[in-house]
Image (cartoon, rainbow, N blue to C red):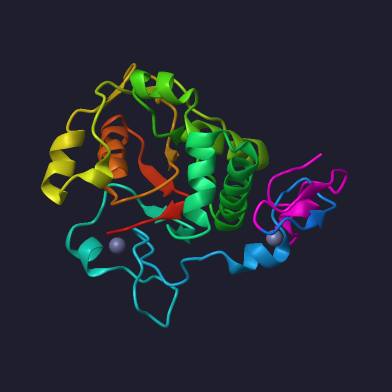
Amino acid sequence: MLTPFTSLNKPIGELLGSFFCCNCVLCGTSLRQNFALCEFCRNELPKIESYCTKCCSEVESQSLQNTICVKCLRNPPAFRHCRALFRYQPPINSLLRAYKFGEGFAEGRILSLLLAREFQQHYATSKIPDILIPVPLHRNRLRQRGFNQAVEIARTISGLCNIPVSLNQVIKNRDTAPQSELSKAARYRNLRNAFALNSRSGFKSVESAAIIDDIVTTTTTVSSLAGLLRAAGIQSIDVGYLPARLL
Ligand SMILES: [Zn+2]
Ligand SMILES: [Zn+2]
């Protein structure tokens, strides 16, 4: 049985057992594991190596420790850390599109497990969040797509890291335009009062939370959500994304 933080140095395929065979979703190599990405393709993914430890925008720095960008120094965000693993470029963009719009669940599982492993490593030496909060979709969007990819990612992290997922406490009460299509000023207006809590007492005993989403255009969406959660009494909020496309 898997317990959190016991297998941090093992490859993901080994972590999940080697009793299934599958093919790598990128190069087609046959694999003796149930994680459909070979070691070679995984090492080629466009990882963000040098980033602001607050908002995860890429920075030019030799030091990976405690780098905070000018924007976060001037205007600290409502969340403590944000972590995006990859740039939104090939093959990450096609993996994510296959998952989001084409029911590519093998691709979704790969992306989710990569983030789950990052979570395990990040919290190996610090307090793990009390709860995971996937960014909610409006009910119209949910009906169209059939599933919320942020919820599925959160479920994978929950399974590996043993953290409960909050599914109903936060709702999106307006069907907003995609953030990527808007100007900076319009993004703030677009999300004003877009999220709401089902009840104010739902997070009564929660001290720390991690917001989960699949992609970041800017941090406007999670800043808005983090502000709401802070107002509900959650003191410490981290954010985990998969790929990043910070503007
Ligand atoms: Zn491969
Ligand atoms: Zn920053």
Quick check: 61 left or right of 149? Answer: left
Q: Position of residue 157 (x, y in %)?
A: 59, 41
Q: Is residue 84 left or right of residue 111?
A: left
Quadrant assignment for the C terminus: bottom left
Residue pictured at 39% horizontal, 29% vertical: 136
Where is ligand 1, by quadrant? bottom right
Residue sitting nearer the eye, 32 or 98: 98
Residue 118 x, y percent position in the rendering: 57, 55
**Mark count:** 0
Using the rendered image of the protein, determine whether residue 180 is visible from the camera's viewpoint. yes
- Viewer-proximal residue, 25 or 88? 25
Overall secondary structure of the magenta stretch? loop
- Placement of the N terminus among the 4 image quadrants: top right
**Residue 135 point in image, percent of width and height:** 39, 34
Position of 39 relative to 161 (above/below): below
Give the residue drawn at x 69%, y 67%: 40
Whether residue 162 is visible to the viewer of this picture, yes or no, is: no
**Residue 221 or residue 8, whichever sits in front:** 221
Q: Quadrant of residue 58?
A: bottom left
Q: Is residue 159 above or below residue 29?
A: above
Look at 48% across and 60% down and name the residue there.
86
Looking at this rendering, what residue extends furthest in the right direction? 19
In reply to whether residue 9 is colored magenta, the answer given is yes
Residue range of the region highlighted in magenta in the rendering: 1-26
Q: Residue at x 32, y 58 (%)?
A: 246
